[in-house]
Image (cartoon, grey):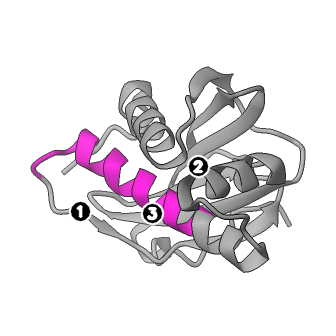
Amino acid sequence: MKIAFDQAEPLDSAVQDLVESLCFAEAHRDGSGLESADLCWSAIALLEPGPAELVIAMGRDLLVEFADASWGAAPDDEDLTDFRMELVNAIGGRYLAILSPDARIRLGMPTAGEGRIAAGSSVLQAARYDVDGELLLVVVRRTSEDRSSGDEHATEA
């Protein structure tokens, strides 16, 4: 099954719904393109239908705000890593369910790190969202079948 991962509306819906329901904030699409600053990121392989990779990235302040709002407690560094991996998993699942409601959904294991998000010809969408004046970046990249394990590094070397 061919999935159109470059459609903006399903990605916007998944991101906006999850940010509102999990983080009690509003995300408004504010253009497209990658960010050159170092960000806290998490990535997950979209295996079925797919293959593709979803990457979310944000500054540490927004990440802390999201985790605190969602969990109701001040997060430590381990909590922040866990939270952003849960968030990318939730957004990835929701995104696939919107794109292909009748398809089987299978995701890889999320990974997390810090740095710049790699550009390149594999980027299908790079959506920028404004959340209370902070940047939330969501990137969808094409992957090959044999690279969809979720182990790819999401940042530039």
Mark 2: give few (<14), some (14-19) or many (20+) Cα within 10 Å. some
Task: Name the residue located 39 percent from the left edge and 25 percent from the top edge.
Answer: 9
User: Can I make out residue 143 in this image?
Assistant: no
Pick the residue in front: 132 or 106: 132
Q: Nearer the viewer, mark 2 or mark 1?
A: 1
Does residue 92 appear anywhere in the picture? yes
Q: Is residue 56 magenta?
A: no
Residue 8 position in % (x across, y down)? 44, 27
Crowd class of label 1 (few under 14; some 14 to 19; many from 20; radius 10 Å)? some
Q: Earlier in the sequence, mark 2 or mark 1?
A: 1
Please give the residue where the numbered disc 2 appears in the rendered image.
Answer: 122
Residue located 73% across and 64% down the image: 74
**Are the residues tagged 2 and 1 within 8 Å (C-beta)?**
no
Label 3: which residue?
Answer: 89
Residue at point 41% right, 57% down?
90
Q: Which residue is mark 1?
A: 105
Pick whichever, 11 or 73, lies toward us: 73
The three-letter amino acid code for the residue at tag 1 is: Ile
Q: Do labels 3 and 1 touch, CB within 8 Å?
A: no
In what element is the residue under mark 2? loop
Q: Does residue 94 show up magenta in the picture? A: yes
Determine the CA span between mark 2 and mark 1: 21 Å
| Residue stretch in magenta | 84-102
The quarter of the displayed image where residue 48 is located: bottom left
Q: Give the amino acid at mark 3.
A: Asn
Earlier along the polypeptide chain: callout 3 or callout 2? 3
In space, the residues marked 3 and 2 are separated at their CA atoms by 20 Å
Q: Nearer the viewer, mark 3 or mark 1?
A: 3
